[in-house]
Amino acid sequence: MRNSLAFHGLHAPKTQQRSKLGVVPPWVIVMYNSVFFSNCVHHPNEKKKEVDKFCIDCLQSFCTHCLPSHAFHKHIKIRRYIYSDVINRQDLCKLFNCSGIQAYHTNKAKVLFLKQRTQSHQQQSSSRDCKCSICGKTLQDNTSLYCSIACKVLNIYRDEEIYVGLPLTKKPS
């Protein structure tokens, strides 16, 4: 079975949808499938037109110039760290249970990777190393279970067939 995330049509039975929606809000899956750090289509001639926010109420990504349209909505700022989309842990914890996700330090803040971390090179690891329970990526601390928000969501839906977008790598058997 190919593991993937998306939400435009969660392909799980209705009873499972009801139980899991309490754990994984729909906007998390939509945010996962959104494209960030591209130019905003609504503000092509503006400076600082990079799409770097996600509106939880409208379920869409947007730039700084779009902010007035989302002034009274809940939204999250997406940041870049090591060429990946990350979210400030403190911001996300108010909206989603972040327990078990490895936090990384950048600019005096703890951030969480939105998508799975890629293995840039073969890592030397010992049997004592803590690894992500979904993709097997080596984690920095032994209290974390997942390398990213995506891996935590995949673990929640582990035994269910959901196909919603981009393929994610499963832990090697």
Image (tube, helix red, strand yellow):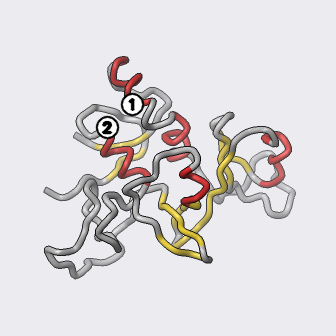
Image quarter of residue 9: top left
Q: Residue furthest bottom?
A: 124
Disc 2 crowd rating (10 Å Cα; few below 14, some 14-19, many 20+) is some
For image coordinates 54% across by 59% down, the residue present is 89
Give the residue number, with chain letter if any, for mark 2. Answer: 157
Q: Which mark is residue 154?
A: none
- Residue ID at (58%, 48%): 94
Quadrant in the rendering for residue 126:
bottom left
Q: Secondary structure at mark 1?
A: helix
- Seen in the image, is 86 located left or right of residue 166? right
Q: Amino acid at mark 1?
A: Lys
| Foreground of the two, 46 or 74 | 74
Measure the alpha-carbon separation of dots 2 and 1. 8 Å
Q: On screen, 25 above or below 155?
A: above
| Comparing labels 2 and 1, the label whose residue is closer to the camera | 1
Image coordinates for residue 129, horizontal then vertical, percent: 22, 74
Residue wearing tag 1: 20
